[in-house]
Image: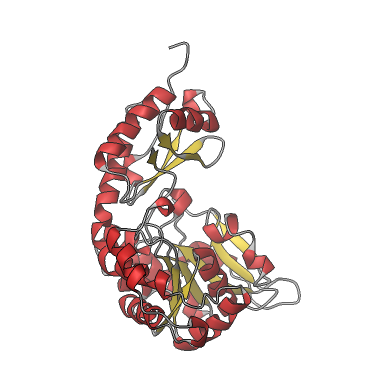
Amino acid sequence: MIDLRSDTVTKPTPEMRRAMMDAEVGDDVYGEDPTVNRLGMRAAQIMGKEAALFVPTGTMGNTIGVKLHTEHGQEVICESRCHIQNYELSMVAWFAGCLTRSIVGEDGILSWEAIRKEVRMLSPHCAPTGLIEVENTANLAGGTVYPLETLAEIYHGAQSLGLGVHMDGARIFNAATALDVPVNRIAAYADTVMFCLSKGLGAPTGSMLVGPRELMDKGRLLRKRLGGGMRQAGVLAAAGLISLEQMPARLGEDHANAKLLARGLTSIDGITVDESKVHTNILIIDVSATGIAPAEISSRAKNNGLLFNAVGPKHMRLVTHYDASHAQCEEAIEIIRRAVRRADN
Protein backbone atom coordinates (compact mmCIF):
# COMPACT_ATOMS: atom_id res chain seq x y z
CA MET A 1 0.00 0.00 0.00
CA ILE A 2 1.35 3.42 -0.99
CA ASP A 3 0.51 5.79 1.84
CA LEU A 4 0.46 9.51 0.98
CA ARG A 5 -2.01 10.56 3.67
CA SER A 6 0.66 12.27 5.76
CA ASP A 7 4.32 12.19 6.70
CA THR A 8 3.15 11.04 10.13
CA VAL A 9 2.88 7.50 8.76
CA THR A 10 6.66 7.05 8.46
CA LYS A 11 8.24 4.10 10.24
CA PRO A 12 11.40 4.44 12.34
CA THR A 13 14.61 3.53 10.56
CA PRO A 14 16.65 0.50 11.65
CA GLU A 15 19.15 2.85 13.28
CA MET A 16 16.37 4.50 15.27
CA ARG A 17 15.15 1.11 16.44
CA ARG A 18 18.63 0.13 17.59
CA ALA A 19 19.05 3.44 19.40
CA MET A 20 15.74 2.92 21.18
CA MET A 21 16.77 -0.54 22.34
CA ASP A 22 20.11 0.71 23.68
CA ALA A 23 18.88 4.02 25.12
CA GLU A 24 20.16 5.16 28.49
CA VAL A 25 17.12 6.18 30.52
CA GLY A 26 16.04 7.80 33.77
CA ASP A 27 12.96 9.55 35.15
CA ASP A 28 12.32 12.57 32.96
CA VAL A 29 9.76 14.07 35.34
CA TYR A 30 12.69 14.45 37.75
CA GLY A 31 14.81 15.72 34.87
CA GLU A 32 17.00 12.63 35.14
CA ASP A 33 16.65 10.98 31.74
CA PRO A 34 20.04 11.55 30.10
CA THR A 35 18.82 10.80 26.57
CA VAL A 36 15.92 13.24 26.85
CA ASN A 37 18.33 15.82 28.23
CA ARG A 38 20.72 15.32 25.31
CA LEU A 39 17.84 15.66 22.86
CA GLY A 40 16.72 18.88 24.50
CA MET A 41 20.20 20.40 24.47
CA ARG A 42 20.75 19.45 20.85
CA ALA A 43 17.33 20.72 19.73
CA ALA A 44 17.90 24.07 21.46
CA GLN A 45 21.36 24.36 19.92
CA ILE A 46 20.14 23.63 16.39
CA MET A 47 17.28 26.11 16.73
CA GLY A 48 19.41 28.79 18.35
CA LYS A 49 17.32 28.88 21.53
CA GLU A 50 18.20 28.63 25.22
CA ALA A 51 16.26 25.51 26.10
CA ALA A 52 13.90 22.84 24.81
CA LEU A 53 11.08 20.67 26.06
CA PHE A 54 10.35 17.16 24.73
CA VAL A 55 6.60 16.55 24.35
CA PRO A 56 4.72 13.54 22.98
CA THR A 57 2.81 15.46 20.29
CA GLY A 58 2.85 18.65 18.27
CA THR A 59 -0.59 19.54 19.59
CA MET A 60 0.75 19.46 23.14
CA GLY A 61 3.73 21.56 22.11
CA ASN A 62 1.51 24.19 20.49
CA THR A 63 -0.89 24.15 23.42
CA ILE A 64 1.93 24.83 25.86
CA GLY A 65 3.45 27.44 23.56
CA VAL A 66 0.21 29.40 23.34
CA LYS A 67 -0.40 29.18 27.09
CA LEU A 68 3.09 30.45 27.91
CA HIS A 69 2.46 33.72 26.05
CA THR A 70 -1.15 34.45 26.97
CA GLU A 71 -3.66 35.05 29.73
CA HIS A 72 -7.29 33.95 29.85
CA GLY A 73 -9.55 36.26 27.90
CA GLN A 74 -7.04 37.26 25.25
CA GLU A 75 -6.95 36.63 21.51
CA VAL A 76 -4.42 34.76 19.42
CA ILE A 77 -3.97 36.03 15.86
CA CYS A 78 -3.43 33.20 13.36
CA GLU A 79 -4.04 32.24 9.73
CA SER A 80 -7.51 30.87 8.97
CA ARG A 81 -6.32 27.42 7.85
CA CYS A 82 -3.76 26.90 10.60
CA HIS A 83 -3.50 23.78 12.70
CA ILE A 84 -4.17 25.36 16.10
CA GLN A 85 -7.54 26.63 14.90
CA ASN A 86 -8.72 23.67 12.84
CA TYR A 87 -7.13 20.48 14.16
CA GLU A 88 -6.29 20.80 17.84
CA LEU A 89 -9.72 20.39 19.43
CA SER A 90 -9.90 24.08 20.33
CA MET A 91 -7.11 23.81 22.90
CA VAL A 92 -6.48 27.53 22.51
CA ALA A 93 -9.88 28.02 24.16
CA TRP A 94 -10.06 24.92 26.34
CA PHE A 95 -6.62 25.15 27.94
CA ALA A 96 -5.32 28.67 27.33
CA GLY A 97 -8.73 30.37 27.69
CA CYS A 98 -8.21 32.43 24.54
CA LEU A 99 -10.02 33.06 21.28
CA THR A 100 -8.43 32.82 17.88
CA ARG A 101 -8.74 35.79 15.56
CA SER A 102 -8.05 34.30 12.17
CA ILE A 103 -6.90 36.07 9.02
CA VAL A 104 -6.98 34.68 5.49
CA GLY A 105 -3.42 34.84 4.22
CA GLU A 106 -2.42 34.49 0.59
CA ASP A 107 -1.29 30.88 0.19
CA GLY A 108 -1.50 30.54 3.97
CA ILE A 109 1.13 33.24 4.57
CA LEU A 110 0.35 36.18 6.84
CA SER A 111 1.85 39.66 6.49
CA TRP A 112 2.57 42.18 9.23
CA GLU A 113 0.29 44.65 7.46
CA ALA A 114 -2.64 42.23 7.71
CA ILE A 115 -1.83 41.30 11.30
CA ARG A 116 -1.42 44.89 12.49
CA LYS A 117 -4.96 45.73 11.39
CA GLU A 118 -6.32 43.00 13.67
CA VAL A 119 -4.28 43.71 16.80
CA ARG A 120 -6.50 44.82 19.67
CA MET A 121 -5.22 46.65 22.69
CA LEU A 122 -6.75 46.46 26.16
CA SER A 123 -10.07 48.29 26.30
CA PRO A 124 -13.46 48.03 28.01
CA HIS A 125 -14.92 46.39 24.92
CA CYS A 126 -12.47 44.09 23.11
CA ALA A 127 -10.43 41.07 24.07
CA PRO A 128 -6.81 42.21 23.80
CA THR A 129 -4.35 40.46 21.52
CA GLY A 130 -2.03 38.22 23.51
CA LEU A 131 -0.03 36.39 20.85
CA ILE A 132 0.68 36.10 17.14
CA GLU A 133 0.97 32.55 15.80
CA VAL A 134 2.42 31.54 12.43
CA GLU A 135 2.50 28.09 10.83
CA ASN A 136 5.60 27.29 8.78
CA THR A 137 5.16 25.37 6.55
CA ALA A 138 1.47 26.19 6.01
CA ASN A 139 -0.10 22.73 5.85
CA LEU A 140 -3.51 23.28 4.28
CA ALA A 141 -2.17 25.90 1.91
CA GLY A 142 -0.04 23.18 0.35
CA GLY A 143 3.14 23.30 2.43
CA THR A 144 3.95 26.89 1.54
CA VAL A 145 6.93 28.59 3.18
CA TYR A 146 7.24 31.99 4.84
CA PRO A 147 9.91 34.22 3.25
CA LEU A 148 12.47 35.25 5.87
CA GLU A 149 11.76 38.93 5.32
CA THR A 150 8.06 38.36 6.03
CA LEU A 151 8.85 36.55 9.27
CA ALA A 152 11.23 39.34 10.25
CA GLU A 153 8.55 41.99 9.69
CA ILE A 154 6.04 40.06 11.78
CA TYR A 155 8.50 39.40 14.59
CA HIS A 156 9.81 42.94 14.85
CA GLY A 157 6.31 44.36 14.49
CA ALA A 158 5.10 42.14 17.32
CA GLN A 159 8.05 43.18 19.49
CA SER A 160 7.20 46.84 18.95
CA LEU A 161 3.77 46.17 20.45
CA GLY A 162 5.00 43.97 23.28
CA LEU A 163 3.56 40.80 21.74
CA GLY A 164 5.12 37.36 21.50
CA VAL A 165 5.31 35.18 18.40
CA HIS A 166 4.84 31.41 18.52
CA MET A 167 5.69 29.36 15.46
CA ASP A 168 3.98 26.07 14.72
CA GLY A 169 7.03 24.76 12.93
CA ALA A 170 5.82 21.18 12.68
CA ARG A 171 7.65 21.03 9.33
CA ILE A 172 10.18 23.82 9.89
CA PHE A 173 12.98 21.63 8.52
CA ASN A 174 11.06 21.38 5.26
CA ALA A 175 10.89 25.16 5.23
CA ALA A 176 14.64 25.41 5.83
CA THR A 177 15.29 22.95 3.01
CA ALA A 178 13.07 24.92 0.62
CA LEU A 179 14.79 28.21 1.52
CA ASP A 180 18.24 26.59 1.64
CA VAL A 181 19.05 28.22 4.98
CA PRO A 182 20.00 26.84 8.42
CA VAL A 183 16.87 26.18 10.43
CA ASN A 184 17.94 28.61 13.16
CA ARG A 185 17.60 31.45 10.63
CA ILE A 186 13.86 30.74 10.58
CA ALA A 187 13.51 30.06 14.31
CA ALA A 188 15.16 33.41 15.07
CA TYR A 189 11.91 35.15 14.14
CA ALA A 190 9.78 33.51 16.83
CA ASP A 191 9.98 33.55 20.61
CA THR A 192 8.93 29.93 20.85
CA VAL A 193 8.92 27.24 18.17
CA MET A 194 7.31 23.83 18.13
CA PHE A 195 8.63 21.28 15.65
CA CYS A 196 7.80 17.64 15.06
CA LEU A 197 10.26 14.77 15.09
CA SER A 198 7.56 12.38 13.93
CA LYS A 199 6.71 13.86 10.52
CA GLY A 200 9.33 14.35 7.83
CA LEU A 201 12.11 13.53 10.28
CA GLY A 202 10.67 10.05 10.71
CA ALA A 203 10.85 9.45 14.47
CA PRO A 204 8.10 7.19 15.82
CA THR A 205 6.73 9.90 18.10
CA GLY A 206 7.56 13.18 19.77
CA SER A 207 7.90 16.91 19.20
CA MET A 208 10.03 19.68 20.64
CA LEU A 209 9.15 23.09 22.03
CA VAL A 210 12.09 25.51 22.12
CA GLY A 211 12.50 28.99 23.51
CA PRO A 212 13.83 30.98 26.49
CA ARG A 213 14.83 28.84 29.48
CA GLU A 214 12.42 30.61 31.82
CA LEU A 215 9.48 29.79 29.53
CA MET A 216 10.61 26.19 29.04
CA ASP A 217 10.80 25.74 32.83
CA LYS A 218 7.18 26.92 33.06
CA GLY A 219 6.38 24.70 30.11
CA ARG A 220 7.49 21.61 32.06
CA LEU A 221 4.75 22.31 34.59
CA LEU A 222 2.16 22.77 31.85
CA ARG A 223 3.34 19.54 30.22
CA LYS A 224 2.70 17.71 33.51
CA ARG A 225 -0.79 19.21 33.73
CA LEU A 226 -1.52 17.90 30.25
CA GLY A 227 -0.34 14.40 31.15
CA GLY A 228 2.98 14.68 29.33
CA GLY A 229 5.28 13.48 32.11
CA MET A 230 6.52 10.39 30.30
CA ARG A 231 9.06 9.06 32.86
CA GLN A 232 11.67 6.88 31.06
CA ALA A 233 11.12 8.70 27.79
CA GLY A 234 14.70 8.18 26.65
CA VAL A 235 13.58 5.22 24.56
CA LEU A 236 11.64 7.73 22.44
CA ALA A 237 14.18 10.53 22.64
CA ALA A 238 16.87 8.20 21.30
CA ALA A 239 14.98 7.90 18.02
CA GLY A 240 14.41 11.65 18.08
CA LEU A 241 18.15 12.28 18.27
CA ILE A 242 18.73 10.16 15.17
CA SER A 243 15.93 11.95 13.32
CA LEU A 244 17.26 15.36 14.31
CA GLU A 245 20.82 14.65 13.23
CA GLN A 246 20.32 12.56 10.11
CA MET A 247 16.93 13.12 8.50
CA PRO A 248 16.86 16.84 7.57
CA ALA A 249 19.51 16.28 4.90
CA ARG A 250 17.22 14.02 2.87
CA LEU A 251 14.06 16.19 2.88
CA GLY A 252 14.90 17.49 -0.59
CA GLU A 253 14.01 14.02 -1.93
CA ASP A 254 10.50 14.41 -0.56
CA HIS A 255 10.19 17.85 -2.14
CA ALA A 256 11.31 16.46 -5.49
CA ASN A 257 8.73 13.68 -5.26
CA ALA A 258 5.99 16.21 -4.47
CA LYS A 259 6.92 18.15 -7.62
CA LEU A 260 6.87 14.87 -9.54
CA LEU A 261 3.32 14.24 -8.31
CA ALA A 262 2.27 17.76 -9.22
CA ARG A 263 3.60 17.44 -12.79
CA GLY A 264 1.92 14.10 -13.28
CA LEU A 265 -1.42 15.06 -11.78
CA THR A 266 -1.75 18.18 -13.93
CA SER A 267 -1.97 15.87 -16.95
CA ILE A 268 -5.14 14.24 -15.60
CA ASP A 269 -8.44 15.68 -16.83
CA GLY A 270 -10.42 17.25 -14.01
CA ILE A 271 -7.51 17.71 -11.61
CA THR A 272 -5.99 21.12 -10.97
CA VAL A 273 -2.77 21.78 -9.07
CA ASP A 274 -0.48 24.80 -9.29
CA GLU A 275 2.98 23.31 -9.73
CA SER A 276 4.63 26.65 -8.99
CA LYS A 277 3.26 26.58 -5.44
CA VAL A 278 4.57 23.12 -4.54
CA HIS A 279 7.58 24.15 -2.46
CA THR A 280 7.88 21.31 0.04
CA ASN A 281 6.36 17.87 0.56
CA ILE A 282 2.64 18.74 0.51
CA LEU A 283 0.34 19.34 -2.41
CA ILE A 284 -3.34 20.19 -2.41
CA ILE A 285 -5.22 19.22 -5.55
CA ASP A 286 -8.63 20.43 -6.74
CA VAL A 287 -10.68 17.48 -8.01
CA SER A 288 -14.02 19.28 -8.44
CA ALA A 289 -13.88 19.20 -12.25
CA THR A 290 -13.76 15.40 -12.23
CA GLY A 291 -17.39 15.32 -11.10
CA ILE A 292 -16.43 12.72 -8.50
CA ALA A 293 -16.54 13.41 -4.77
CA PRO A 294 -13.16 13.39 -3.02
CA ALA A 295 -14.33 10.63 -0.66
CA GLU A 296 -15.18 8.44 -3.66
CA ILE A 297 -11.81 9.11 -5.26
CA SER A 298 -10.14 8.20 -1.99
CA SER A 299 -12.12 4.96 -1.80
CA ARG A 300 -11.29 3.99 -5.39
CA ALA A 301 -7.62 4.75 -4.88
CA LYS A 302 -7.52 2.69 -1.69
CA ASN A 303 -8.94 -0.30 -3.56
CA ASN A 304 -6.02 0.03 -5.96
CA GLY A 305 -3.28 0.39 -3.36
CA LEU A 306 -3.06 4.13 -2.63
CA LEU A 307 -4.06 6.04 0.50
CA PHE A 308 -4.69 9.78 0.40
CA ASN A 309 -7.40 11.95 1.92
CA ALA A 310 -9.94 14.66 1.20
CA VAL A 311 -9.45 18.06 2.86
CA GLY A 312 -12.82 19.54 1.95
CA PRO A 313 -15.58 19.14 -0.62
CA LYS A 314 -13.29 19.93 -3.57
CA HIS A 315 -9.73 19.30 -2.47
CA MET A 316 -7.46 16.40 -1.60
CA ARG A 317 -4.02 16.35 -0.01
CA LEU A 318 -0.96 14.24 -0.78
CA VAL A 319 2.14 14.26 1.40
CA THR A 320 5.47 12.76 0.41
CA HIS A 321 7.93 11.26 2.90
CA TYR A 322 10.87 8.89 3.11
CA ASP A 323 8.65 5.78 3.08
CA ALA A 324 7.23 6.82 -0.33
CA SER A 325 9.77 6.26 -3.09
CA HIS A 326 10.09 7.98 -6.46
CA ALA A 327 8.70 4.86 -8.14
CA GLN A 328 5.75 4.70 -5.76
CA CYS A 329 4.90 8.34 -6.48
CA GLU A 330 4.91 7.57 -10.19
CA GLU A 331 2.60 4.63 -9.52
CA ALA A 332 0.35 6.87 -7.41
CA ILE A 333 -0.19 9.16 -10.40
CA GLU A 334 -1.50 6.25 -12.47
CA ILE A 335 -3.72 4.99 -9.67
CA ILE A 336 -5.29 8.46 -9.37
CA ARG A 337 -5.68 8.63 -13.13
CA ARG A 338 -7.75 5.44 -13.01
CA ALA A 339 -9.64 6.55 -9.91
CA VAL A 340 -11.02 9.71 -11.54
CA ARG A 341 -12.00 8.02 -14.79
CA ARG A 342 -15.76 8.23 -15.08
CA ALA A 343 -17.72 5.12 -15.97
CA ASP A 344 -19.07 6.80 -19.12
CA ASN A 345 -15.57 7.51 -20.47
Residue 250 appears in view: yes
The residue furthest top is 344
Picture quadrant of residue 340: top left
Tell me which residue sits at (28%, 57%) in the image: 178
Q: Nearer the viewer, residue 295 or 285?
A: 295
Picture quadrant of residue 38: bottom left
Tell me which residue sits at (56%, 76%) in the image: 223
Q: Nearer the viewer, residue 115 or 241?
A: 241
Q: Nearer the viewer, residue 106 or 224?
A: 224
If the image is split into quadrants, where does the N terminus sit? top left
Give above or below for 104 relative to 43.
above
If the image is split into quadrants, where does the C terminus sit? top left
The residue furthest front is 21
- Point out residue 119 in the picture as x, y percentages from the top left corner: 59, 70
Q: How many marks?
A: 0
Tell me which residue sits at (32%, 45%) in the image: 324
Tell me which residue sits at (33%, 38%) in the image: 262
- Point out residue 37 in the picture as x, y percentages from the top left corner: 39, 82
- Point out residue 150 in the picture as x, y percentages from the top left corner: 39, 65
- Point out residue 298 in the picture as x, y percentages from the top left corner: 49, 33
Tell me how the rendering is colored: secondary structure
Residue 106 appears in view: no
